[in-house]
Image (cartoon, rainbow, N blue to C red):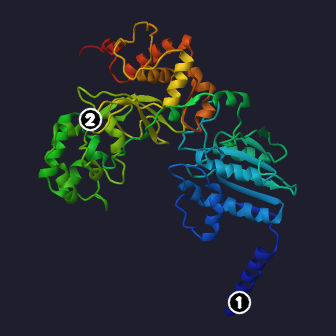
Amino acid sequence: HTLFSQWLSNEAKEANTVKKDTPVMVVMGNPPYSVSSTNKGDWIQSLVQDYKKDLNERNIQPLSDDYIKFIRYGQHFIEQTGEGVLAFITNNSFIDGLIHRQMRKHLLQTFDEIYILDLHGNAKKKETAPDGSKDENVFDIMQGVSINLFIKNGSKITRPSDFGRVFKADLYGTRKNKYTTLEQTDFNTTQWKQLAPQAPEYLFLEQDEKLFQEYNLYFAVDSLFITTGRGTSFRKDNLLVKSNFTSKDVLTMLEDMKALSEEELLKKYSFKETKDWKINEKRSLFLNHLDRDIQKVLYRPFDFRYTYYPMDTINKIIVRGDDKRSLMHHLITDSVNQNNALIVPKQSLEGLGALVSNNITENKIVSAYNPNYIFPTYLYPEDGSERTPNLNPEEIQAFEKALNLPFSAEKTTRPGDFSVTFVPQTEFCPVDILDYIYAVLHSPSYRETYKEFLKTDFPRVPYPTPETFWPLVSLGGQIRQLHLMESPALDQAITPYPVA
């Protein structure tokens, strides 16, 4: 036992000497994938900081995933050596992830050649093969994976702007077919396609460079609107919103919070107490409600519920800042205050989703995979003063120039029924811009043409022309009214049901 222990100790010392003093030429393996990484040593975390520079993103926690740390680890040692190969099968999120752009740039600056065999199989994205058939993961996991070769061949990249070349191949289908293909092909027989990653995203995707340049001339939705944010996450959905199909259901819930015991409430509403949400600590927040505290909610697409949303205390009812009070304030409507808001995800990984809302809005309306962002048309000051357009003045000027028309913050001459042909106006207002954008985002040709770019960031929309603007405003207005359940067309039933 003692001899065996001594032998292991000697082997460990020799291995450490090799790792410390011998140049590393090849790093290979299948590193773990774990967003909640426990590998938090100062040395590796300082290295990974290179991938986090200048991102200005809300959540960069995924860049601390173990697989990313292993890539950075291997990259470091091959940089020290000056040449070598890093060969990993990993989580494939770095290929096109929005927050991974500095990682991709850093890899391009280090390696002379990068080869990526994307095995896809991402169940979270509900991936399918290009022909619509089933696409399965090669492992029993939901996250898609890829086989990656990062090669530094000794040639010196003299300037940071000189990037290595990137090649990619894709493998879709069933797990069995993927295994068969991997067994029967090798590096030389794989059909590699060279990519041309473009700043600022440096996506490891096949893209039409000319189309990319065209798309980048359009305005980004998030640059048009001044104030935006994610939708509300109720956390205690079963209690606060899920079972409240009418305002009366909310009143019942409020009465239950006052009268029922903890055990009775937990059983009736099927929710759990948490460290930051104890029934007896929250009861007082549900007392003495006002009529305006009961609000309509867009909970899912075309699925309206009701909730208890007292502005003064909602941040204590919905904890961790998920109430989005300052944003939802602009969507609490009554007979006087009316508003519309555009809803889009930051990345359209499941295909572009776009909806409108004129009520408090939940966080998973148009995308289950990515948070939804809410863009109100108007902002309502909390002091009750006059509302103002939630639009960037520079973008308004660009619209005025494109249309050769003045902008008006308010306009009362618009027809309420968009089913009639819309007549060009002598000015345009915020809802005209909203309807124009809404028409473009629901155009099948737009979605198909720019589908790869829509996966990377907020949608970009072409500036209007005088010839197309008003027809698109009319179409967008019709779609908006339908989606808000306000269109006269909804009064005409198109599906008959037999009378029993």
Which residue is the extreme one toward the right? 155
Above or below residue 267? Residue 364 is: above
Q: Percent position (x, y) of residue 490? A: 33, 16
Which quarter of the image is occupied by the N terminus? bottom right
From the viewer's side, name the closer residue of 18 and 315: 315
Which residue shows up at 49% across the image and 12% down it? 470
Q: Secondary structure at mark 2?
A: loop
Q: Percent position (x, y) of residue 174? A: 64, 41
| Quarter of the view holding residue 202 | top right
Which residue is the extreme one toward the bottom? 2
Kind of residue sitting beneath label 2: Gly
| Quarter of the view holding residue 44 | bottom right
Few, some or many C-alpha atoms within 10 Å of disc 1 (few <14, some 14-19, many ≥20)? Answer: few
Kind of residue sitting beneath label 1: Gln
98 with respect to 406 (left or right): right
Which residue shows up at 25% across the image and 42% down it? 309
Which quarter of the image is occupied by the C terminus? top left
Q: Secondary structure at mark 1?
A: helix
Few, some or many C-alpha atoms within 10 Å of disc 2 (few <14, some 14-19, many ≥20)? Answer: few
Q: Earlier in the sequence, mark 1 or mark 2?
A: 1
Above or below residue 20? Residue 300 is: above
Q: Percent position (x, y) of residue 401? A: 56, 19
Cα separation, mark 1 vs mark 2, equals 78 Å
From the viewer's side, name the closer residue of 249 and 159: 159
Residue labelled with disc 1: 6
* Nearer to us: label 1 or label 2: 2
Residue labelled with disc 2: 384
Q: Percent position (x, y) of residue 324? A: 36, 45
485 with respect to 72 (left or right): left
Residue 221 visible to an observer of this rendering: yes
From the viewer's side, name the closer residue of 386 and 349: 386
Are the residues flagged by discs 1 and 2 in contact, CB closer than 8 Å? no
